[in-house]
Image: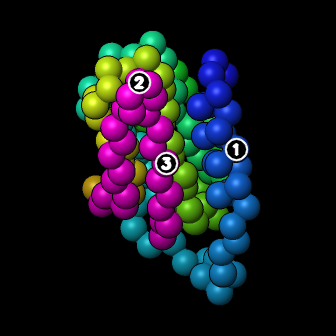
Amino acid sequence: MKNPITYLLVAFMALTSLTSCSSDDDNKTVGSREIRYEITGEFSGQSLDATYTVNNGATNAEVTSLPWSYTFTANADTRAVSFSAGGFGAVPGEKITIKIFQGDTQKASVEGTANSDGIVAVVSNATIN
């Protein structure tokens, strides 16, 4: 982890993973279990990192170019996913958008804009079925 933003994003992801889900639907799997995370937009900064859940565990990746995506098949017991991206050194006003898809269905989309210090941070969560 290269910068303080990454630490903040990882801490947020850890906190959101502590939420519980109802057990009355534990055996119901509906639709595609394919989850895709995407980052699009403009980012000319020094470092952009993505942090995301894969089957109830968090991982991160350095994003070297946009657009960027990562796809995995969720386990039957995975009920929610989290995705965040953050970076520094961007031109103020540059925008990135993070999206979460389940199959072909977009579950979440959040846009972030680099502030006057060139820092951008975006966080999103989605419930999957």
110 drawn magenta: yes
Earlier sequence position, callout 3 versus callout 2: 2
- What range is drawn magenta here? 105-129
- Residue 103 seen in the current view: no
Earlier sequence position, callout 1 versus callout 3: 1
Q: Secondary structure at mark 2?
A: loop
Q: Residue at x 58, y 66 (%)?
A: 79
**Can you identify the residue that label 3 sits on?**
123
Q: Residue at x 66, y 74 (%)?
A: 21
- The kind of residue on which mark 2 rests is Gly
Residue 53 percent location from the top left of the image:
59, 46
Q: Secondary structure at mark 1?
A: helix
Give the number of the disc on residue 67. Answer: none
Q: Residues within 10 Å of mark 3 (few under 14, many from 20)?
A: many
Residue 2 percent location from the top left of the image:
63, 18
**Can you identify the residue that label 1 sits on?**
11
